[in-house]
Image (tube, rainbow, N blue to C red):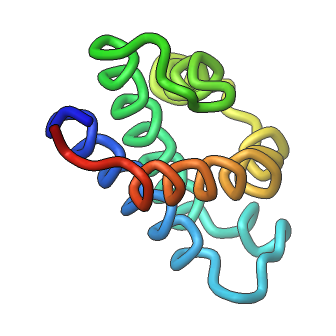
């Protein structure tokens, strides 16, 4: 695996870990929705995840990340459609998609070696 891709995978892993750190053990949608700082922090981490994924795809468009293009689209939506970001959709991404991505990133990092 190229060093650049490894760096981006590590960036994604750090952002995912940060999202889970921000939310804590008790993940509560109402607390998320009521806390602007928390929402903005998580949105920023999703931007980083999307940008790192986009950079990976530019190096290797065949990388086996489920929903890679959707991840990039989410990043674009959060950045460019900031006034239309829906907390319910973001919460769904956090609850459903981020855990899957976490598993995939961990598998990549555990199984791949730097070329």
In the drawing, does residue 57 fall left or right of residue 70? left
Q: Residue at 71% of width from left, 88% of height from top?
A: 25
Q: Is residue 23 above or below residue 64?
A: below
| Quarter of the image with the C terminus in it | top left
Of 37 and 110, the residue lying toward us: 110
Q: Residue at 76% of width from left, 36% of height from top?
A: 86
**Rendered image quadrant of residue 103:** bottom right
Of 42 and 109, the residue lying toward us: 109
**Rendered image quadrant of residue 53:** top left
- Residue 68: image location, x then y, percent: 58, 24
- Residue 70: image location, x then y, percent: 65, 21
Q: Is residue 68 above or below residue 105?
A: above
**Rendered image quadrant of residue 102:** bottom right
In the drawing, does residue 97 fall left or right of residue 29? left
Of 52 and 112, the residue lying toward us: 112
Instruction: Spot the residue most to the bottom.
Output: 25
Q: Is residue 103 above or below residue 25?
A: above
- Residue 111: image location, x then y, percent: 43, 54
- Residue 14: image location, x then y, percent: 37, 62
């Amino acid at each position: 695996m190229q060093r650049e891709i490894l760096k981006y995978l590590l960036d994604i892993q750090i952002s995912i870990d940060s999202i889970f750190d921000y939310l804590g053990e008790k993940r509560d949608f109402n607390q998320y929705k009521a806390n602007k700082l928390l929402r903005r922090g998580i949105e920023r981490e999703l931007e980083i995840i999307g940008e790192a994924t986009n950079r990976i795809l530019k190096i290797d468009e065949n990388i086996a990340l489920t929903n890679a293009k959707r991840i990039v689209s989410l990043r674009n939506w959060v950045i460019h459609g900031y006034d239309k970001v829906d907390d319910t959709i973001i919460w769904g991404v956090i609850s459903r998609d981020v855990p899957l991505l976490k598993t995939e990133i961990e598998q990549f990092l555990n199984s791949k070696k730097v070329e």
